[in-house]
Amino acid sequence: MLETEEPTGGNPGNKEMNVDTTGQQETAAQTEPTGAENEKTFTQEEVDKIVEKRLNRERKKFSSILNGDDPREAELVERERAVAEKELRIEATETFMKENLPAELLDLLNYTDKESCEKSIELVRKTFTINVQAAVERRLWGGKPPKKAVNDPTGDLRGAFGLR
């Protein structure tokens, strides 16, 4: 189907759309109102329907993007989350190194966002410090001290500790 636009009535601003259904391009002489049977004109209602169909087709095509269901967008969000998590892990590692905390505890942290990560670092720091302090105190206390030192001139350690 060929479409041609030709000025009508000598006025270059007025254009009329002619569609030749025979497959041949019309000349200016053929487009004059001579009652040509192969010429198709559209009413405003028909044009509106054509445009509406085309708009619906495009809306359907891009509906996933408009609704936020675009898989590319989900992939991008996932990548951003992964990058943010890596950055937070690097910062946490630096903090652990500065404070001499064991790197094994890095897996306990919450890396969803900066605030959550900082809270979990603080919790791990407090818990670790309390537990280390308790372990040191237990070791310093040891078992019950002997009531009386055993004097063993032979140098037998078993006797020194009362283990005979």
Image (cartoon, helix red, strand yellow):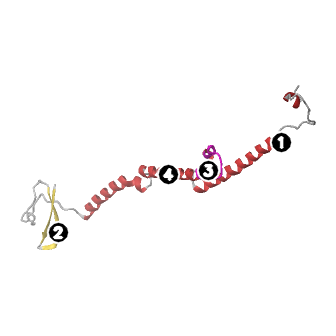
Q: Which residue is mark 1?
A: 141
Q: Specify whether 62 is left or right of 50.
A: right
* Residue 91 drawn at (x, y percent): 57, 53
What amino acid is found at the position of numbered circle 1 in the picture? Trp
Q: Which residue is mark 3?
A: 97
Q: Specify whether 23 is left or right of 109.
A: left
Q: Nearer the viewer, mark 1 or mark 2?
A: 1
Residue sitting nearer the eye, 120 or 134: 134
**Separation (CA) of disc 1 from disc 2:** 103 Å
What amino acid is found at the position of numbered circle 4 in the picture? Val
Quadrant in which the C terminus is drawn: top right
* Residue 76 drawn at (x, y percent): 45, 52
**Separation (CA) of disc 2 from disc 3:** 77 Å
**Separation (CA) of disc 4 from disc 2:** 57 Å
Residue sitting nearer the eye, 163 or 111: 163
**Separation (CA) of disc 1 from disc 4:** 48 Å
Q: Are marks 1 and 4 in contact (CB under 8 Å)?
A: no
First to last magenta residue range: 92-106
Outermost residue, right side? 148
**Label whose residue precedes the other's in the sequence (1 or 2):** 2
Q: Which residue is mark 4?
A: 83
Q: How packed is label 1: few (under 14 Cα within 10 Å), some, or many (20 or more)?
A: few
